[in-house]
Image: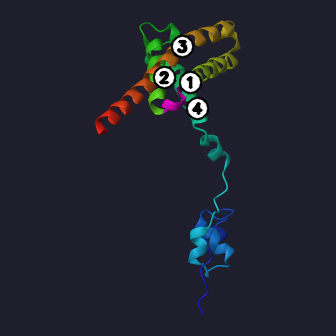
Amino acid sequence: RKEPATPLWRTSGLGGPRNCWDHCWAATSGGRLLDTLWRRCRWRPRRTRLDRLFQSRRRSAFLLGLALGAAIWWLSPIITGRREPWDAEGGYYPGALLLSGILGGLVMPQHWGSVAIGIYAGQAVVLLGGVVAAPASGGLWPLGLVFLAAYSVLGLVGAGVGTGLIRLRARRARSRSG
């Protein structure tokens, strides 16, 4: 009689079955896997912290906004030559806020408000990080947070526009199909 192969998860140190097949293999003492058991198995792999973090679409929308808001500030010295985006000449800061809001609204149309809040939070994190890194330059940071809130309304408007574009496209597709 041929001995069945040991499942990979048992020898690799991964800590447990990675899918239903491995679970059923272990539950039936290896090799004698019943086809009906495999089909009816309700076992699911244990969720990791990262899985739970991205499980919520609202949380993902917030994280997307956080990244977009931080990117506005991180890219400002490269694009405009100014450390703070609102000091840049031209329409960099309002344009970047609108564009990031539209992008967030297009990607996460169901949670466009969370994207807008994330855009504000991402900017605030970078602003406060700069204050912590160079305390002498941050005497007006409370006023800066107020300005961020006022300017971030543009991110909210942009997210609404992006969401509106997605909904308009869906409405047109429904009317064409009939």
Circle 2: element type: helix
Q: Earlier in the sequence, mark 2 or mark 1?
A: 1
Question: Three-letter amino acid code at disc 2?
Answer: Ala
Which residue is identified by label 3? 153
Q: Earlier in the sequence, mark 3 or mark 1?
A: 1
Which residue is identified by label 1? 113
- Looking at the image, which residue sits at the far front? 178
Q: Say which mark, if any, is on residue 155.
A: none
Image quadrant where one finds the N terminus: bottom right
C-alpha distance separating marks 4 and 2: 14 Å
C-alpha distance separating marks 3 and 4: 18 Å
Marks 4 and 2 close (CB-CB < 8 Å): no
Q: Which residues are magenta?
A: 108-113
Which residue is identified by label 2? 159
Image quadrant where one finds the C terminus: top left
Q: Is residue 174 above or below residue 22?
A: above
C-alpha distance separating marks 3 and 1: 11 Å
Q: Is residue 34 above or below residue 48?
A: below
Q: Is residue 11 magenta?
A: no
Circle 3: element type: helix
Whether residue 25 sits left or right of residue 115 in the image: it is right
Q: Earlier in the sequence, mark 3 or mark 4?
A: 4
Q: Is residue 109 magenta?
A: yes
